Amino acid sequence: DIDFTVLTGLQAFYGGVCIFTGAMPALPETIQVFDCSNNGDGDLIASTGTIPTIPASCHSFALVRFAVTTLGDVSDCTAMASFNAGYCTNLANYVGGTVAGEADASFTFEGCAFTAAALESFFAGCVANGGFNAASFDVSGGTNAAPNATTLGYIAILEGAGCTVTHN
């Protein structure tokens, strides 16, 4: 097991096939790139099932094909240019309020399981940011819910600002 918090100064972590036992580990405040894309059939075995709070320094985060259920707070990730939690087929919840990131950031939740309420909360957070003008958002595929009327309103605001949104 790796305790990322004791790896002071760690800026980048690349793991081809990762299996975490217990909860997803906290990330150090210095991390800039975290890429743990499980391209095999294994799933994240997590007691909490939550993607941890991502430090503000992180500009690229990928956790692909894991059994996480909840996306945690991303409100401080003002440097975020790329966020990929694709094919996390249990990822159904979003908590955290405002969604921060670069103006042209890319957020991928393709093949996940977001509920209509989670989509509404996530896109409300994106609109609350007010800074996305060329960002792309993919919440298609999997069992992601179709956006409700309120969420479609948020999506229209983002699209009006030049963003691209792909959804079921």
Image: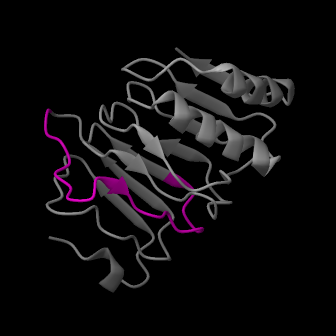
**On screen, residue 102 above or below 138:** below
The structure residue drawn at horizontal position 63% and vertical position 60%, both measured from the top left corner, is 75
Q: Is residue 51 magenta?
A: yes
Residue occupying the far right of the picture: 160
**Relative to 168, residue 11 above or below:** below
Rendered view: 23 above or below 37: below
The residues colored magenta run 41-60
Q: Is residue 18 visible?
A: yes
Left or right: residue 166 compared with residue 43: right
Residue at 25% x, 42% y is 67
Q: In which quadrant of the rendered view does residue 92 lie?
A: top left
Residue 42: percent from left, percent from top: 13, 39
Of the pair 163 and 114, the residue shown nearer to us: 114
Return the residue nearer the eye: 37 or 85: 85
Q: Is residue 164 visible?
A: no
| Residue 23 is a magenta residue | no
Choose top left, top right, bottom left or bottom right for residue 147. Answer: top right
